[in-house]
Amino acid sequence: MKPSVKANLAAFHHDARLYLTLGIANWSVFVDHIPSNVVNLLTLRNFGFSGAADLFVFVVGYGVAIIHGRMTLERDYLVAATRIFRRVWRLYAAYVVLFVIYIATIAYVASQSMAPEIIHEYNISGILEHPLRILVRGLVLQEEPLNLDLLQLMIPLMAFFPFALWGLLRRPNLTLAASVALYLAARWFDWNFRVYPDQEWTFNPLCWQMLMVLGGWFAVTGAPGRALRDMPWLRILAGTYLVLAMAITLLRHSPAMSAYLPDLLLHSITPADKEDLAPYRVVHFLALAFLATHLVPADHPGLQLKPLQAVIRCGEEWLAVFCVGVFLSFAGHLILITSANLVAMQIVVSLAGFAAMTAVAHYVAWSKWQDLPAALRQQAS
């Protein structure tokens, strides 16, 4: 292992900002998945080129590199790699259970004529005629029901990460360069995973892997981040880019205002371009992360506020909260299309979803605590 990498991993301390970011991403995904919801106008995707998916992938890459890099220090790389593959299995198991229950719920709702059009909206129109075929294709990740694409993306990314971690611990710059090369090749040659019959994944893993490796690279190197913070001109540049991205995104929301955008910006920059992870999307996320970490240091007292603690808890238990959020977004959408879709109702549905996700996160954390041996519980307290 490279000595500088070893030193950075050994010096790392708990950073609540990572879990806060995952919690924000979970809450954003939930409200973004409810169409015609006024609350989702406040999420990141409406103010720039990146969104909640970018937060998820980068922070998971950062966290996995820290946790399993330190495990490599204390035990061995083989142990760390097998623990990552165990996470892959948990992700896949969660996806399969969620997939089966999710499509069964949607099919039931459609068959009961409560909202028959919803089966097409959620991209499982063949479930009533060929349920077994849909199920089998779902098990091999050849189906992509609406709102499961991000969880589906995390499975190959996490499966790929043990190999990326091996390189990051030894030659981090070379590993990042190889990741960027794969990203560029996937975009140039239009490589992507396929969904039956002739569609492509919403998130191209061959491109999005770069963001996860980038998160791991920042985690194991550490020093570049400190060097960048000593460059005030870079903060000005990052802030300018974020303001420009926000202006372009807000102008594009209005057809009348879009007329004021130059054709080059209007046609070459598509903030919704997430399949192949557009370069300007990556730059936007990095600029946002750079300024956020500068303005909110790891020891910021605001991180102890109770409302933020709820979000942080949702980040600590991100997988369970994400799975619950998928069902809650479906339930929220169903409530809004079968009742008076008023702004007040949209806000109530969103707040109820946040409360339910927080309750699930606290329960999962409490359950894990109860499973610990009594000696460990006493030591931790």
Image: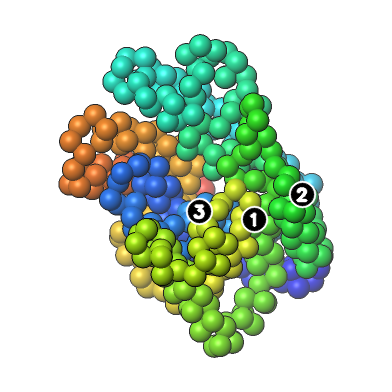
Q: Position of residue 249 (x, y in %)?
A: 43, 63
Circles 3 and 2, Cβ within 8 Å, touching? The answer is no
Residue 120 visible at all: yes
Which amino acid is tagged 1? Met
- Position of residue 117 in the picture relative to residue 267 (left or right): left
SS label for mark 3: loop
* Label 3: few (<14), some (14–19) or many (≥20) C-alpha neighbours in 10 Å: some
Q: Please state which of residues 75 and 122 is positioned toward the viewer in this rendering.
A: 122
As displayed, is residue 199 above or below residue 74? above
Q: Position of residue 82 (x, y in %)?
A: 73, 42
Please report the residue visible at 54 percent of the width from the left and 72 percent of the height from the top. Answer: 287
Which image quadrant: the N terminus?
bottom right
SS label for mark 1: helix
For marks 3 and 2, the one nearer the N-term is 2
Q: Which residue is mark 1?
A: 212
Please report the residue visible at 51 percent of the width from the left and 75 percent of the height from the top. Answer: 241
SS label for mark 2: helix
Q: Which residue is mark 2?
A: 189
For marks 2 and 1, the one nearer the N-term is 2
Which amino acid is tagged 2? Phe
Residue 272 is tagged as 3
CA separation, marks 3 and 2? Answer: 21 Å
Q: Give the quadrant of residue 34.
A: top left
Which amino acid is tagged 3? Ala
Q: Please state which of residues 368 and 355 is positioned toward the viewer in this rendering.
A: 355
